[in-house]
Amino acid sequence: MESPPVLLKDWRLTFSLLHYFDNPIEFCEIDGCLEHGKCVQTMSERDMSFQVGDRVIHWMYGLGEIIQLDEKVLSGHTSKYYVVQIRDLTLWVPLNETGEHCLRLPTPARDFKKLFRILASPGEPLSPDRFARKTQLTELLRDGTLKSMCRVVRDLVYYKRTKKINENDNSILAHARNFLLNEWSVALSVPVQQAEFELRDLLKMDVL
């Protein structure tokens, strides 16, 4: 049995129901990306930024792989998509400028190591008010850059040393941490466990 679409609070979500050959196809469009659908038609590779087999980084979900090229019909219009597998999640990302801004290639090793300066630097203050802090962190996540993910991890770890963090803080920290570690592992060709050890060392902490 297929799992239902993963729903995340604080992100723009639009839901629709398609029918193809009388079979319902449920999908979720997240800022131009279709989530958890079924393939309806394959197509040849041509004039694209990414190819099948490429490992890519989705701006919100992190590390994945392009497993197929696909077409879907929505409201009478046919659109082309990259099918991206991210763990147990499948995303349909449009083959257009908006969709391709959702994806990028993993950061080169040399550029990735430059991020260590952010992680090792003092954390910037977060608001003691949980609603204002949530807004601060959400804006960083919406930026979708690796620099912002590093800042989220650094600042929450710094905040956590002197103040209690709530469930939402923990959820954001876990998301940013996993996003960072998965790309770290690919960019520097090291196991995730080693990346986590090095991250703890940069943050100067025993556990994360």
Image: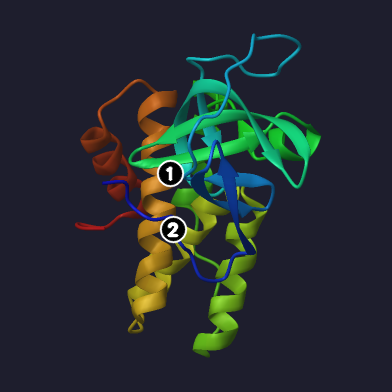
Nearer to me, 22 or 35: 22
Nearer to me, 106 or 28: 28
Q: Mark 2 or mark 1: name the one nearer the start of the chain.
A: 2
Q: Residue 180 carries which label?
A: 1
Q: Where is residue 206 in the image (x, y as percent from the top left)?
A: 19, 57
Toward the front, the furthest residue is 22
Q: Where is residue 51 in the image (x, y as percent from the top left)?
A: 59, 14
Q: Position of residue 54 (x, y in %)?
A: 51, 17
Which residue is painted at 43% across and 45% down in the image?
179
Whether residue 199 can be seen here? yes
Give the residue type that dot 2 points to. Val
- The colour scheme is rainbow
Nearer to me, 41 or 102: 41
The residue labelled by disc 2 is: 153
Q: Position of residue 194 (x, y in %)?
A: 24, 34
Which residue is painted at 63% across and 14% down in the image?
43
Direction from residue 37 to residue 76 in the image, left or right: right
Helix, strand or loop at label 2? It is: helix
Q: How crowded is mark 1: few (under 14 residues within 10 Å), some or many (20 or more)?
A: many
